[in-house]
Image: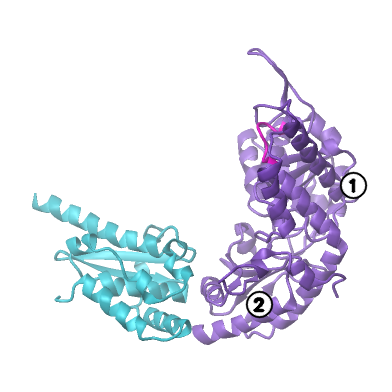
């Protein structure tokens, strides 16, 4: 049972209540992006309308006030992830950019020919391709920790794969297809013992469960505002101070330097070293409102709510003949990927859309995982803070109707 | 062939407008997809795949005396139905008629937003490919007569 009033939560999301003339939305694609509560929309709009100014550049009051709010969100993010220091929080454009930043800055300065980056079989393309590009450039190789048929990492293989050549272990906190929550702390402990640093892709976990980077013991944790009820175009890179401090800049530009000469430039300390150019100021401020919103509900309540929905959905979906769910890890998060025998996911998604039910169809940016599961694509229903059992009932009814049309 | 491409599109729109309700319109599209001639396996090649579709789509064409005959297939039933609509409209017509006649039927079928936004399901990619075949065959034919 959820410990919060779901109807009061839903009333704060204009997409669920206030779309004039539009039919009721059954939104089951929160793993792709989340809907936005009014407080986030207002925070961003009000900043533009009343308080707009640039950050870290202006002598005038508006700029100084904007800077204070922008840096205030950095502190909120620190607290949200329980990082030790506020300087460990770098604002990026999102999870993808954060991984690319680490791959290009840390990766290119540390990885040498013959080294390895270890990822898992359930990674999103962002956590594969970013590393692959760097590996190709320096002559390193990408190795893969396999998963079992329930969609869990085969930890028995981990120590064998953690050779002294492995310098980075990059893994999802929660799979964007299987919903599996990986034992990150255990992986990090073993990876550190083998001398590797650990990057955790928190895109799917950050808004759905309590996250404590000190408890996880990871060196990097990355996530995206737009999946966390916040605006698009912002994300967080948490980096452990000692690691960030040693990393060279990735992108050059304004605001990341101390002195610039044509012969030599000296760079700011983290996080500014990694925030070249004017950042997405209003979006960061909106993100601050989103973090407050999520903390106001309480992520432990949120996690309980979504686990309840996942259990309910798993049970109800099995009523649909021929339906197969991928991923049965205990304690999995609110992401359910499935196929129905004899029906193309595209057809299912199209006919659900006709009924006002939004799901994702495709390979979910995880083609290697699709190959492992033996399918080209799946349908995926995923939940958020505003999801209800009624949404799941609508999905199941919708699927019965789809079967009626397709068979 | 007396019926023009425009005539066929008008007939298709008229027929779909007599079908009440989105579910039956989809049933009709899927039924038309089932009636597509079996796609020859020797043409199920990477080069015959239409790019830009969320599902897999194959399209092959051959010229015959100034006209183009198409065959197509998809792994999704709705998309297969859409292929069948496209081929019912264009297949068997002359190079010039295919090149000159835009597809107007898509918006007239009373399908949801999803299908009308043809980029998503590859319908626009399919239509483009249909025209490209006609253009290529016409260019080849002109070369031979020169």
**Location of mark 1 (residue):** A214
Is residue A76 or residue A162 the one in the foreground?
A76
Q: Position of residue A197 (x, y in %)?
A: 81, 41
The tag earlier along the polypeptide, 2 or 1, is 1
Q: Position of residue B73 (x, y in %)?
A: 39, 71
Residue B92 inside the magenta-drawn segment: no
Q: CA distance from mark 2 to mark 1?
A: 37 Å
In the displayed structure, does residue B96 sit left or right of residue A298?
Answer: left
In the displayed structure, does residue A395 sit left or right of residue A385?
Answer: left
Residue at 74% across, 56% down: A39
Q: Colour of chain A?
A: purple
Magenta: main secondary structure equals loop
Q: Position of residue A341 (x, y in %)?
A: 58, 79
In the displayed structure, does residue A349 sit left or right of residue A84?
Answer: left
Q: Is residue A19 above or below residue A281?
A: below
Indicate the quadrant containing the N terminus of chain A: top left, top right, bottom left or bottom right. bottom right
Residue at 69% across, 81% down: A393
Query: Which residue of the protein is positioned furthest toward the front in this rendering?
Result: A50
Per the image, label 1 sits on a secondary structure element best described as helix
Q: Position of residue A145 (x, y in %)?
A: 74, 54
Q: Quadrant of residue A205?
A: bottom right
- Chain letter for the residue marked with disc 1 in the picture: A
Per the image, label 2 sits on a secondary structure element best described as strand
Is residue A328 or residue A352 the one in the foreground?
A352
**Location of mark 2 (residue):** A324
Q: Which residues are magenta?
A: A274-281
Residue at 40% across, 79% down: B29
Badges 2 and 1: C-beta atoms under 8 Å apart? Answer: no
Chain painted in cyan in the figure: B
Residue at 45% across, 84% down: B21
Q: Quadrant of residue A108?
A: top right
Is residue B93 or residue A385 the one in the foreground?
A385
């Amino acid at each position: 049972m959820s410990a919060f009033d779901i109807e009061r939560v839903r009333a704060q999301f204009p997409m669920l209540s206030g779309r004039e003339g539009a039919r009721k939305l059954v939104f089951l694609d929160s793993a792709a992006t989340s809907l936005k509560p009014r407080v986030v929309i207002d925070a961003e709009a009000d900043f533009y309308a009343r308080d707009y100014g640039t950050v870290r550049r202006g002598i005038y009051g508006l700029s100084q006030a904007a800077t204070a709010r922008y840096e205030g969100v950095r502190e909120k993010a620190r607290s949200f992830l329980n990082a030790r220091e506020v300087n460990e929080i770098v604002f990026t454009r999102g999870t993808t950019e954060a991984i690319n930043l680490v791959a290009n800055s840390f990766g290119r300065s540390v990885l040498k020919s013959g080294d390895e980056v270890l990822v898992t079989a359930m990674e999103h393309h962002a956590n594969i391709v970013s590393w692959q590009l760097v590996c190709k450039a320096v002559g390193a190789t990408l190795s893969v920790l396999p998963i079992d048929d329930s969609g869990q990492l085969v930890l028995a293989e981990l120590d064998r794969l953690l050779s002294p050549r492995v310098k980075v272990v990059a893994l999802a906190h929660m799979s964007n297809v299987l919903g599996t929550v990986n034992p990150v702390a255990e992986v990090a402990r073993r990876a550190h013992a083998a001398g590797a640093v650990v990057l955790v892709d928190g895109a799917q976990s950050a808004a759905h469960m309590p996250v404590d980077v000190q408890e996880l013991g990871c060196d990097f944790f990355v996530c995206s505002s737009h999946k966390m009820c916040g605006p698009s175009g912002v994300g967080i890179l948490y980096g452990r101070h000692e690691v960030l401090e040693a990393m060279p800049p990735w992108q050059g530009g304004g605001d990341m330097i101390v002195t610039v000469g044509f012969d030599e430039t000296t760079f700011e300390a983290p996080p500014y070293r990694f925030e070249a150019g004017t950042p997405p100021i209003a979006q960061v401020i909106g993100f601050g409102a989103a973090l407050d919103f999520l903390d106001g509900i309480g992520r432990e309540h949120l996690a309980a709510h979504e686990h309840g929905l996942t259990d309910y959905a798993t049970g109800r979906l099995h009523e649909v003949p021929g339906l197969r769910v991928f991923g049965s890890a205990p304690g999995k998060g609110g992401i359910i990927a499935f196929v129905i025998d004899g029906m193309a996911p595209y057809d299912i998604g199209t006919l659900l859309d006709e009924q006002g039910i939004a799901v994702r169809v495709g390979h979910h940016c995880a083609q290697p995982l699709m190959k492992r599961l033996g399918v080209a694509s799946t349908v995926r229903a995923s939940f958020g803070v505003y999801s209800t059992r009624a949404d799941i009932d609508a999905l199941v009814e919708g699927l019965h109707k789809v079967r009626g049309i397709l068979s | 062939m007396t019926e023009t491409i425009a005539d066929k599109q008008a007939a298709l729109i008229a027929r779909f407008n007599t079908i009440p309700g989105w579910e039956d319109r989809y049933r009709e599209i899927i039924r038309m997809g089932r009636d597509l001639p079996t796609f020859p396996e020797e043409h199920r090649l990477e080069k015959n795949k239409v790019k830009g579709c969320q599902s897999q789509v194959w399209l092959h064409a051959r010229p015959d005396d100034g006209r183009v005959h198409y065959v197509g297939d998809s792994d999704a039933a709705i998309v297969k139905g859409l292929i069948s609509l496209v081929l019912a409209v264009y297949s068997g017509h002359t190079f010039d008629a295919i090149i000159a006649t835009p597809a107007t039927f898509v918006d007239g079928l009373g399908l949801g937003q999803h299908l009308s936004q043809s980029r998503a399901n590859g319908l626009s990619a399919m239509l483009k490919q249909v025209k490209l075949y006609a253009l290529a065959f016409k260019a080849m034919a002109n070369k031979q007569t020169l």
